[in-house]
Image (tube, rainbow, N blue to C red):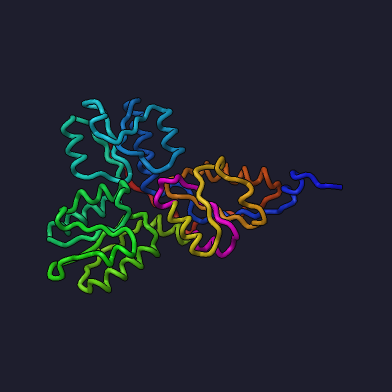
Amino acid sequence: MEMSMANQVTMDNKEIFLARTQGFCAGVGRAVKIVEQALKKYGPPIYVFHEIVHNTYVVKDFINRGVIFVEEIGHVPLGEHLIFSAHGVSPDIIHEAKERNLICIDATCPLVKKIHRLAIEFSQRGYQIILVGHKGHQEIRGTSGYIDPKLLHYVQKLDDVVNLALAPNKPITYLTQTTLSVDDTREIIAALKMKYPQLKEPSTDNICFATQKRQDAVKELAKMVDVMIVCGSPNSSNSNRLKETGEKAGVVSYIIDDESQLNIGMLKRKNKVGISSGASVPWIIVERLVDKIQTAYPGTIVHNLESESPKKAFPLPEI
């Protein structure tokens, strides 16, 4: 007797392995709480410069609750409340907001703030600063505003190091976007040191600890699974780096915004499914993805790899 397609699907046993690090990172959690508290205290509308974090679910939820996201300060009415996103903003944006008498609340991730302080310090000391990251990314646009333009040089990929032309008789340092791939950054820094032996390293690593932990978790997961699904929005830098990390570990990897984007056919003949998520992805997205897979493949077993360390939390500013 011919077996139905539905029966064929349910007989294909699956196992799901959840990466150790899931849910909001400390910086994202802080930014989301800031918007939550501002809505509660002042009521809508609350204006936010850029998306508060790069996640479609979070942004849509806030829009439905009266948050207005803007890309230009001039679009915020005089005297209104304005929140700066977790990615940080340049001094010019802060100045423009003050000129409009906006009541500003800063949700910049404290780790990004650390990069801003280093940018100011190195600029004041006359260092030529190599800014490693994606030039159009909001974090890089914000950080670049704290660097003297005459001292600023961009590197987006390894090949860009070849085209750098810095004065050899002046001090040189570098800063990086916090959400880059640890491995890719390591290669770029090694190339910079080779070309400029006098290169001064920042006092602390620029890559955010949450980014590194998630990438390490994906590497661990890659040894256990034969397909990787990363939950994350297409404009999320750290989510895209997780997908790349899975691919470099030799595992077929996909990135999806939510469970609706999962084509169950992706899992055909893939019995061990790894699931990771970006730093701005709420846990509910992962839960819904697991539910969809379990509905398509009843009897699917879920392995939850517990985090080895407690989650970090940042204090909130006065709102």
Q: Is 163 drawn above or below residue 297 in the view shown?
A: below
Position in image of residue 44 (x %, y %): 35, 25
Q: Which residues are magenta?
A: 218-239
How many numbered marks are there? 0
Task: Mark yes or no: residue 168 visible.
Answer: yes
> Is residue 217 highlighted in magenta?
no
In front: 142, or 318?
Answer: 142
In front: 85, or 20?
Answer: 85
Position in image of residue 36 (x %, y %): 38, 34
Residue ID at (19%, 50%): 146
> In what quadrant of the picture does the C terminus appear?
top left
Position in image of residue 256 (x %, y %): 51, 46
Q: Residue furthest front?
A: 163
Task: Mark yes or no: residue 109 visible.
Answer: no
> Is residue 220 highlighted in magenta?
yes
Residue ID at (17%, 62%): 128
From the viewer's perspective, tell me whether residue 222 is left or right of residue 233: right
Q: Residue furthest right?
A: 1
Residue ID at (27%, 33%): 82
Position in image of residue 20 (x %, y %): 51, 56
Residue ID at (15%, 70%): 168
In front: 240, or 111?
Answer: 240
